[in-house]
């Protein structure tokens, strides 16, 4: 496996365009997995030809997921056009935030620094930033270990104080409750996730791989859609760089030590088994039989299978 063989190509351009369109522009009907089996050049051509600067924030989020699975850093410039536009609405802020996330994933050190500054000086300070706080907080985790939460945290704390002082009826109370819940719950979780990600990146390789496996299998306290994808990509990079023997050994140990008794254990077994297969190892006959028998559930990044 290398960066050009992350997925076995099995779709012609016409089908590839249809699958990419259904995923990027599917809205609430977007499939749970980035379509597999598409040629890299077809992805680049489709996004360059179709992604518009006024497309929805969701379309930009989904485009970023395509970039992550196929490691398509060469289309970052298509997304960066958004940064040159005036930010007027909450949708504009969210769209720009996903572009900042793409920059964090695929940009140079210089571009990432500029993206951090843009985030703090433009997005955080915008009058409608409070309408998309979850997306902004997530973006700070994606940017880690670059930058910090100071500006966004200060904005949240300041707005909570203003909202508390402005309570005069049910509507203003509801607004205060919404903001204060983010301050009490989401903000501390974001701080923890940011710190854990930074700590994992600083670990020695063996310890880091163990932590990444736990995150990817949904067994870490920071496991969520973003962090599991992040962990999977790092594990895949280790495989590409021929550093995955310990990873595969640990995944086989997961299969050996997992007793399938409920949906959670079934999910862990399936995810570990799919990862082993994707990382070019083979299940033995007993493991394959158990894998075939379990009820499949969930979407798995380390898999070349586009269906759940």
Image (cartoon, helix red, strand yellow):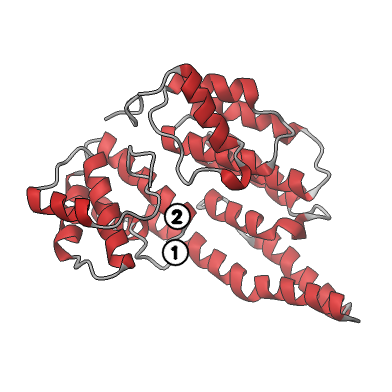
Q: Is residue 264 visible?
A: yes
Q: Is residue 292 above or below residue 102?
A: below
Q: Where, quadrant-wise, is the N terminus in this rendering?
A: top left
To which residue does mark 2 refer? Answer: 227
To which residue does mark 1 refer? Answer: 222
Along the viewing direction, whichever of 12 and 71 lies nearer the viewer: 12
Number of callouts: 2
Q: Are marks 1 and 2 in contact (CB under 8 Å)?
A: yes
Residue 138 locus on image (x, y percent)? 58, 56
Residue 253 locus on image (x, y percent)? 16, 59
Q: Is residue 285 left or right of residue 239?
A: left
Along the viewing direction, whichever of 159 and 297 lies nearer the viewer: 297
**Label 1 or label 2, whichever comes before in sequence order:** 1
Mark 1, secondary structure of its residue: loop
Q: Residue at x 89, y 77 (%)?
A: 166
Q: Is residue 185 left or right of residue 124?
A: left
Q: Residue at x 36, y 47 (%)?
A: 232
Residue 173 locus on image (x, y percent)? 82, 79
Q: Residue at x 39, y 53 (%)?
A: 201
Along the viewing direction, whichever of 285 and 107 lies nearer the viewer: 285
Q: Is residue 54 left or right of residue 297?
A: right
Residue 145 badge? none
Q: Is residue 113 visible?
A: no
C-alpha span from label 1 to label 2: 7 Å
Residue 268 locus on image (x, y percent)? 29, 60
Mark 2, secondary structure of its residue: helix
Q: Residue at x 50, y 67 (%)?
A: 192
């Amino acid at each position: 496996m290398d960066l050009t063989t992350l997925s076995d190509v099995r779709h012609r351009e016409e089908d590839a365009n249809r699958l990419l369109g259904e995923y990027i522009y599917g809205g609430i009907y977007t499939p749970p997995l980035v379509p597999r089996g598409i040629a890299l050049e077809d992805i680049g051509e489709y996004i360059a030809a179709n992604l518009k600067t006024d497309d929805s924030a969701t379309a930009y989020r989904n485009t970023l997921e395509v970039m992550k699975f196929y490691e398509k850093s060469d289309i970052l410039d298509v997304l960066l056009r958004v940064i040159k536009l005036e930010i007027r609405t909450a949708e504009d802020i969210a769209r720009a935030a996903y572009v900042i996330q793409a920059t964090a994933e695929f940009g140079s050190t210089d571009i990432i620094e500029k993206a951090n500054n843009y985030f703090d000086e433009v997005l955080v300070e915008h009058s409608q930033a409070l309408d998309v706080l979850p997306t902004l907080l997530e973006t700070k985790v994606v940017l880690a270990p670059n930058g910090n939460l100071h500006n966004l945290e200060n904005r949240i704390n300041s707005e909570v104080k203003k909202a508390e002082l402005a309570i005069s009826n049910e509507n203003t109370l509801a607004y205060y409750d919404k903001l204060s819940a983010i301050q009490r719950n989401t903000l501390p979780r974001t701080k923890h996730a940011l710190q854990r990600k930074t700590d994992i990146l600083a670990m020695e390789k063996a310890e880091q791989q163990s932590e990444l496996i736990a995150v990817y299998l949904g067994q870490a306290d920071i496991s969520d859609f973003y962090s599991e994808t992040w962990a999977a990509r790092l594990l895949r990079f280790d495989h590409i760089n021929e550093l995955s023997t310990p990873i595969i050994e640990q995944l086989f140990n997961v299969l050996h030590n997992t007793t399938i008794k409920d949906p959670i254990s079934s999910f862990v077994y399936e995810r570990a088994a799919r990862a082993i297969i994707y990382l070019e190892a083979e299940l033995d006959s007993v493991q394959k039989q158990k894998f075939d028998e379990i009820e499949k559930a969930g979407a798995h990044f380390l898999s070349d299978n586009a269906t759940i």
